[in-house]
Structures are given as C-alpha cells and as structure tokens.
Amino acid sequence: MALLIFLLSWYFINKMLLEKLLNLGRRIIPGPIFTFFQPAYHLLLNLLAVFWYQFPAKKLKVIGVTGTNGKSTVVFLISRILEEAGYSVAAISSIQFKIKDKIWANNLKMTMPGRFKLQKFLRQAVQSGCQYVVLEVTSEGIKQHRHQFIGFDSAVLTNLTPEHLESHGGFENYKKAKAKLFQSVKPQGKIIVNLDDKSADYFMQFPAKEKIGYTVNSKPEFKLNLLGQFNISNALAAISVAQAEGISLDKIKLALEKIESIPGRMEIVIKEPFTVIVDYAHTPDALEKVYQTIRETFTGRIIGVLGATGGGRDRWKRPVFGKIAEQYLDKIIITNEDPYDEDPQLIIDEIAAGLKQKQPERILDRRQAIQRALKLAQKSDVVIITGKGCEPWMCVKNGKKIPWDDRQVVKEEFSKL
C-alpha cells in the first residue's frame, strides 16, 4: 500500500515530466521496443487510477457499448430509457458527459476519456447517487486498457465495419480489440449483439449469463422520430438492453417516442426552404447509409459537403468516400475536416481521386464550403454536411484545436443568405 501511495503521488507531481519522457522515448527508443512496453505503461496507469478513485465501478451497473457506428446514439437511447424507468443515470459518449440532470459537451476530442478522467467520472457518478453508467467503449480506449478493472454488467455490439485499420494493423486485430470488452463482462452479465452484422457469431461466443440478439427483421411497434434504418437498429439495441434490465415495453416506448433527435446525428438544422442535415458519418459504411436514407426520404437534389480526418489515419478510406459521394450526391463539395498534421489539400485531393465521372468542388475553408452549399441549394433540396456532427473543435497542425460546430456555422451562414 505504501508503494502504491508513493507511485500515485509521484505520478501526479511528475505528470508533465512523465509525458515529456514518453514523447522523448518515442523518438529515441526503437519502435518495436517502445511498442512492446507501451501496453504495460497504459495498464499501470489504469491500475493507479482505479486505486486512486477506489474502484468506483463496483458500486454501479455498467453498460458498455461498442461497434464501429451508432455507439453514441445507442448510449443516448439507453440513458433516456433508463431515466424513463426511474433510474439515476450517468453516461459518456463522443457527444456528451452526463451525470443525472447535469450534462456537458465532450470537448476532449476523445470518445473514451483517459484513465484518471474516466475513473474520476465514475467516482462522481457514485457520489451523485447514480445507479447505472452507460459508456461508449472504443477500440483505441481498449488498446490503452481504459476498460480494465471496471467489470461490465452488459456489453453491446452495434456493428463492425473496417475502421482504424492502420492503428490496429488490420481488421482482425480491430475486431479482437472490440472483443476485449465482451471478455470484461462479469460472469452474471449480459451480451447484446446485432444479429444483422457479419461478426455476430464471433461476439456471441463469449461467456455470459444471458445472450441477446436483435435484428431489424423483427417487428416492434414503436414510433421512432429518427431518420434511417440504421437508427431502427440502434433503437433495437437500446430496447434489448432495457428489456434485459427488466424495463417494461410501455416505459421503453414512452422514452423513445419523446426523443426528437440526437445531437449531430442526422440532425436537421434547417427545414425551409430547403433542408440542411448535419451528421457525424466518418466511415464508408456510415456515409453510405446516411446518403441512402436521404435519397429514400427526400425528393430534391442532394448537395454534400464532406472531408476526411487526417493525421495519417485510415488513408485507405479517402477515395472510398469520393466513390460513395459520386454514387449518391448531385453536387459534391470536398473540404477540410480534421487535418491534424497532414496537408489538408492533399487529403481533399485523395478523396477526389475516388470520383471518376463527376467533378467535385474543392474548397479548403470549411466555412466557405458550407456557405457555397447553402447558396447552391434550392427549394426541396437537401444539404448534407458530414464528418464532424456536433464536435466542438477542428484539429489542425501542432496540436492546435480551433473552436467549431457545423450546426452553428450552418445557422450563421444561412442567416446571411
């Protein structure tokens, strides 16, 4: 115990120094050696955080939601249903933090907070009298052992499509990272899996007291105000979790029918004289589903503003974005998104390389790109702006973050028309 107290004290006192040493290590230590020891570093930090905040998850029922797309929406829906049933709920997603009635934006540009932030949040949830906590669990967070020592009562898989392939070294490794959440479910816990996903059987194999599958081929009778079949799947995930927790269908139905929209997820920002929608879609699968939904729902032209996250990650999907945009959009505007340290013009050009017939407009300034789309739109048209949703920052070189919100920019530029 004395050693643990010493390590914790040393960490907090020397946190900045430790981070500098870690960055120095990345530069001078051979890559394979640094990569070998890095997991142990992350695991140790998580263990210290758990001890420091006294294992708060033990006093909560913890529901973890993972997958490639739909995680934030499912977290949002589960939270609302639990609250409708009379429970006190805490939740973390890429959209927001929530402890009972207190809600604040997730400004971290990180879906799953770091070890000490996460454990502190769980401690605050306990102190506030929460009974449930619903967590969006990412493969990157799992890679850094942020899920360890929590002990999940339920694990949910929304879907699995290629993402973070360069970081994980391929799709199979990405899938295995996601699987570690299911391996962290308590023996008396529950597994909830989307049976419409190709990886369903893989995730259903992990031990749990109860295993539940859901499919859009079932026929639940709920009024859902959210656009898209993918949101039917998201709602079914939340319904399955709620039923597993013993919540009546009447309560579930009442909760879902009260939800008008999800922040930054197929969110209609302008309704007349044309429609403007903002969505987070940042994977090929999500982007195509968004475009399909708009094509099936609206009759006018579709004007799309899109980009791709930079920073050397998942470059493979940039031309794929271009190909999908060409298939569904009547007018294509490619712009900057989150370039990090990459050349944003290069990213734009790599997206444009996926188009073979249509000529996109390339507008580096994202505000100008949105402004251009709004000027092009006519009555009954739809402007769909993807990639950032309700994210509060745009990340550029040298670690700089510029305050940003696609929804606010849309409103500002629309008011100038």
Image (cartoon, rainbow, N blue to C red):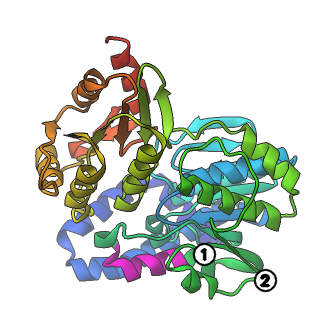
Name the image quarter holding the N terminus: bottom right
* Label 2, residues with CA under 10 Å away: few <14, some 14-19, many ≥20: few
Q: Earlier in the sequence, mark 1 or mark 2?
A: 1
Nearer to us of marks 1 and 2 is 1
> SS class of the residue under badge 2?
loop
Which residue is identified by label 1? Answer: 195
**Residue 164 image point, x, y percent:** 35, 67
User: Residue placed farthest to the top in the image?
Assistant: 416
Front residue of this view, candidates 239 and 400:
239
Residue at (25% x, 33% y) in the render: 366
Instruction: Say whether residue 207 is left or right of residue 353.
Output: right
296 to the left or right of 346: right
| Residue 174 is a magenta residue | yes
Determine the residue positioned at 80% across, 49% down: 253
Tell me where residue 91 appears, x and y as whole percent.
Answer: 66, 50
Dot 1 alpha-carbon crowd within 10 angstroms: few under 14, some 14 to 19, many 20 or more: many
Q: Is residue 152 above or below residue 261?
A: below
Q: Is residue 393 left or right of residue 226?
A: left
Identify residue type, mark 2: Lys
Seen in the image, is 156 located left or right of residue 34? Answer: right
Q: Is residue 109 visible?
A: no
Q: Real-space Cα distance between discs 1 and 2?
A: 18 Å
Q: Is residue 177 magenta?
A: yes
Q: Are marks 1 and 2 in contact (CB under 8 Å)?
A: no
Determine the residue positioned at 14% across, 38% down: 362
Assign the magenta stretch its main secondary structure. Answer: helix
Amino acid bearing label 1? Leu
Nearer to me, 62 or 345: 345
| Residue at which label 2 appears | 209
* Residue 381 location, quadrant: top left
Query: Residues in magenta?
Result: 168-179
Image height of 391 relative to 21, above or below: above
